[in-house]
Image (tube, rainbow, N blue to C red):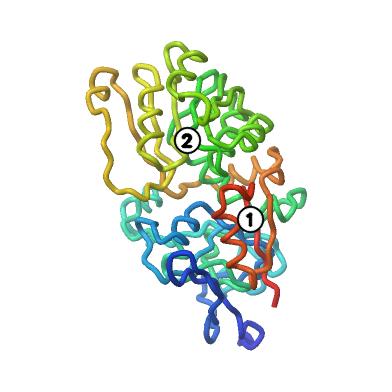
Amino acid sequence: MTTNLDQYKNDKVVFVDEPGKASLHYKGEPKALKPDEVRIEAIYTCLCGSDLHTFRGRHPSVSLPATIGHEMVGYIREVGSEVKNLHVGQRVVVEPLQVCGTCSACLQGKYSYCEDMKLQYRIGNGFLCKYVAVPARFTYPVPDELDDESAALCEVLAIAVRGVRRAHVHMDEDVLITGAGTVGLLAAAVCSKIGARKIIIADRIEQKLELAKELGATHTINTTVDNIQEKVRKICPLGTDKALECVGLEATLVDCLQSVKRGGTVTQVGIFEKKELTLPAPIFITRELTLTGCQSYNFDFEAAIDLACKIDLKKLVTHKYPLTEIQQAFDTFNDPHSGAIKVLLYPDW
């Protein structure tokens, strides 16, 4: 049966046109689905920290102009001919990846290491639109008990899950998290759910630190008042077992390295706008530290969806805008005085 594509015409998608400027562009003629794809109608799409790097023109992996948007919840409106496990009308979230599926990494179940791995928005398939076609293999049904706003945050929760897994955080370990943005806040929540002992989070905004406590942090450090390294040593004299850097700054990465105990692990989650860093190299030998990175996901969405039903994600949602007000949404998100944590957008055409 041939699908009537007219119903998907006149759709628009957000582009960051130049630093500080975002607008809607018509997507052009809709294309028929591939056999292994589904077409989704967005309910909400979130702005993400990586979108903000792109909006500022400083994302190290994105050239402008570029589509953006990769955190979405929506309804399936069409399924490809080979899709058997999903159906029209299901509410779903999307893991926004494209991988080859045939390389050694993919065949070993390590698809995040696929040499051809791409994020959908970086290949022109941004989710800040009304309709989007994505691979069915990366599409996950949402439980009925999870509301739309919380479901929209499953993707960023999957990033936090991935970061905590990459850090190998275990029960009864002490953890430092630098940055109380969405990922840092959710990393604190994930650490709490798995039974970490002392969960210390550092940020310069007191409102976010208070929210961190509500989500599971046991200690907070306001960096406008206290020195991270000194405060950590007061809380954990030998240092923390693990640290997650969720800002993307040289200074906070050094704070993490200096704050973990001997044999500790630091996991870099934040995106660096600056590509070259100066680090205290001798401590990697004298204290036998491990520095790891974290990108995207690898079978983390199922755990994130499960945790989304156990964490009050709506606490993070601070603003909502129609997509036709995308510039105002970004201006708010980019304003450190706005109180914005998670900004949700919805199609209004």
Q: CA distance from mark 2 to mark 1?
A: 26 Å
> With 94 as the anchor, is 237 left or right in this view?
left
How far across and down, in percent of the image, does residue 349 sit?
Answer: 69, 78
> With 255 as the anchor, is 72 left or right in this view?
right
Residue position for label 2: 165
Q: Is residue 96 above or below residue 290?
A: below
Along the line of sight, the residue nearer the viewer: 331 or 343: 331
Q: Earlier in the sequence, mark 2 or mark 1?
A: 2
Q: Residues within 10 Å of mark 1 (few under 14, many from 20)?
A: many
> With 282 as the anchor, is 211 left or right in this view?
right
Q: Is residue 349 above or below residue 328?
A: below
Q: Quadrant of the N terminus?
A: bottom right
Q: Residue at x 41, y 34 (%)?
A: 252
Residue 240's disc number: none
Residue 343's disc number: 1
Q: Amino acid at mark 1?
A: Val
How far across and down, in percent of the image, does residue 159 sit?
Answer: 51, 45
Q: Are marks 2 and 1 in contact (CB under 8 Å)?
A: no
Tell me where residue 30 sits by quadrant.
bottom right
Tell me where residue 249 sits by quadrant.
top left
Q: Residues within 10 Å of mark 2 (few under 14, many from 20)?
A: some
- Per the image, label 1 sits on a secondary structure element best described as strand
Q: Residue furthest right?
A: 145
Q: Residue at x 54, y 18 (%)?
A: 172
The answer to whether residue 1 is visible is no
How far across and down, in percent of the image, does residue 45 sit?
Answer: 62, 61
Along the line of sight, the residue nearer the viewer: 111 or 108: 111
- Per the image, label 2 sits on a secondary structure element best described as helix
Q: Residue at x 56, y 66 (%)?
A: 127
Along the line of sight, the residue nearer the viewer: 65 or 146: 65
Mark 2 or mark 1: which is in front?
Answer: 1
Q: Residue furthest top?
A: 237
